[in-house]
Image: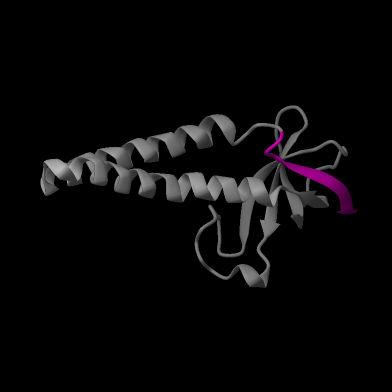
Amino acid sequence: MLEQARISKILSGNMVEVELIQPAVCGKCCACKSKSSEVFTMKAENNIQAKLNDLVEIEYGSSEIFKSILIAFLMPVFLLLFGFLIAAKHGETIGIIVGLLFLLIGLMAARLYDRFFNERSDRLAKLLCVVIK
C-alpha cells in the first residue's frame, strides 16, 4: 500500500517516525492510534536519507496489516469461544470462567505479538522517495 507522509521525528539509526494523513475513505472508525482525527504516526525505514519535515512516499504491506488485525482482534475471540466450548460440558459457569481465561491468554498473546514481532524490519514501512523537501 502506497501513502504519502511527512517525517515528524528522526529516530536512531535509519529509522524515522512519519505522520500519515488519513484519506477521506478511511472515515472516523477510531481503529488507528491517532493524535488527532486526521493524522497518525508510524515508524519507517529511511534508506533514502530523507530529512525532517520532508514529504515522502512510503510503502507498507497490506497483508502484514491484515495479519496483525486478525491476531489482535480475532484470535482472542476464537480462544474465548474455544475455551467456553471445551469447558461447557462441566457446567455453564465453568465454561464462562474457562472462556474468559482463554480470552485473557489471547489478549496477552496479541500483546506479545505486538511487542516482539511488530518492529521486525520486514514489517516496517519503507520510504520510497522524497516528494517535497
Quadrant occupied by the N terminus:
bottom right
Q: Position of residue 110 (x, y in %)?
A: 45, 39
Q: Quadrant of residue 39?
A: bottom right
Residue 127 or 19: which is nearer the viewer? 127
**Residue at 78% of width from left, 50% of height from top?**
58
- Taking the image as drawn, is residue 133 in sight? no
The quarter of the picture where residue 98 lies is top left
Residue 126 falls inside the magenta stretch: yes
> Is residue 77 shown left or right of residue 18?
left
Q: State whether residue 115 is above or below residue 34.
A: above
105 left or right, relative to 129:
left
Q: In the figure, 34 relative to 120: above or below?
A: below
Where residue 60 sits: x, y (%)? 72, 48
* 43, 12: nearer the viewer: 43
**Which residue occupies 55% across, 45% down?**
68
Q: Is residue 84 above or below residue 40?
A: above
Main SS category, magenta section? strand
Q: Nearer the viewer, residue 13 or 32?
A: 32
Residue positioned 20% across, 40% down in the render: 87
User: Left or right: where does residue 49 sit relative to residue 79?
Assistant: right
Q: How many marks?
A: 0
Is residue 71 toward the left or the right of residue 62 in the image?
A: left
- Locate residue 126, reporting x and y percent: 77, 42
Magenta region: 122-133
**35 inside magenta stretch:** no
Which residue is drawn at the image coordinates 34% and 35% (left, top)? 105
Residue 48: give x, y in percent of width and height: 88, 39
* Residue 55 in sight from this viewpoint: yes
